[in-house]
Image (cartoon, helix red, strand yellow):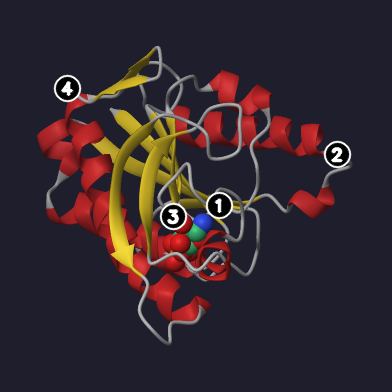
């Protein structure tokens, strides 16, 4: 079985979109793939409630409980391996999805799952990387921003792009209204990308992404 582990920090609506797709299209039977676990760095992440209701394994690793970024990364890697390795041929998850996971992964984590971590970002990368992408687009006076799904590399939001879609900035938009419209697009793009990867697999070579 190709196991998928999803990392969240909050509401988890992107994670929920993936899980609903997986259930509806019966990935387990059709593609031999399944979402096995949801990991959060926040105990009160709303998405954990959805994950438990959908009978997924969940884990909370509070980054504040670790003495260093490196120590958190080591614990996170072990947890991803444990939850994603169960019942998989490789002993590891086939894919790790950052779906609103608001921590930067250190190089040890990225190297442990090479080319197998993807992220959704609420802007048209390389524009507006970082934790405040929606606010930054508004401050810059952008007339459009959008959503990007990309492979995670050692940089911050610098990995190879898989798919992007623009979202117009409307007169009167504030951060909340613009982010909500972006998230509608994000959920669709991310669920589509993960479906394609569940079906075909993902390879990355010289920053070129192939899903086939
Ligand atoms: C998304 O916009 C994601 O790109 C950003 O945080 C938001 C998470 O939303 N990093 P949700 O938790 O999936 O609802």
Where is mark 3, residue-wise?
A: 123
Is ligand 1 within 8 Å of the beta carbon of the residue shown at mark 3? no
Real-space Cα separation, disc 4 to disc 1, in angstroms? 27 Å
From the viewer's perspective, tell me whether residue 8 is left or right of residue 171.
Answer: right
Where is mark 2, residue-wise?
A: 68
Front disc: 3 or 4:
3
Q: Earlier in the sequence, mark 3 or mark 1?
A: 1
From the viewer's perspective, tell me whether residue 170 is left or right of residue 130.
Answer: left
Q: Position of residue 192 (x, y in %)?
A: 21, 47
The residue that appears at 34% across and 72% down in the rendered structure is 181
Q: Earlier in the sequence, mark 4 or mark 2?
A: 2
Q: Position of residue 203 (x, y in %)?
A: 31, 18
Q: Is residue 119 above or below residue 184?
A: above
The residue that appears at 51% across and 76% down in the rendered structure is 175
Give the SS element for disc 2: loop
Real-space Cα separation, disc 3 to disc 2, in angstroms? 29 Å
The residue that appears at 62% across and 27% down in the rendered structure is 109
Q: Position of residue 163 (x, y in %)?
A: 28, 41
Instruction: Give neighbour class at mark 3: few <14, some 14-19, many 20+ (Cα, 10 Å).
Output: many
Instruction: Determine which of the numbered discs, if any, sits on residue 101 in the image.
Output: 1
Instruction: Determine which of the numbered discs, if any, sits on residue 212 in the image.
Output: 4
């Amino acid at each position: 079985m190709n196991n998928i582990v999803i990392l969240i920090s909050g509401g988890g609506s992107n994670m929920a979109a993936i899980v609903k797709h997986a259930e509806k299209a019966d990935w387990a039977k059709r593609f031999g793939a399944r979402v096995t676990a949801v990991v959060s760095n926040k105990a009160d992440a709303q998405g954990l409630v959805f994950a438990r209701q959908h009978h997924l394994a969940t884990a909370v690793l509070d980054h504040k409980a670790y003495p260093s970024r490196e120590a958190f990364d080591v614990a996170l890697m072990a947890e991803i391996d444990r939850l994603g390795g169960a019942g998989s041929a490789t002993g590891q998850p086939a894919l790790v999805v950052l779906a609103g996971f608001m921590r930067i992964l250190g190089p040890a984590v990225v190297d442990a799952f090479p080319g197998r971590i993807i992220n959704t970002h609420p802007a048209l990368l390389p524009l507006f990387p970082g934790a405040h992408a929606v606010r930054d687009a508004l401050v810059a006076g952008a007339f459009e921003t959008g959503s990007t799904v990309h492979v995670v590399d050692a940089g911050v939001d610098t990995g190879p792009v898989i798919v992007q879609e623009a979202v117009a900035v409307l007169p009167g938009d504030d951060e909340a209204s613009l982010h909500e419209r972006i998230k509608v697009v994000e959920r669709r793009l991310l669920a589509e990308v993960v479906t394609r990867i569940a079906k075909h697999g993902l390879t990355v070579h010289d920053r070129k992404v192939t899903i086939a």
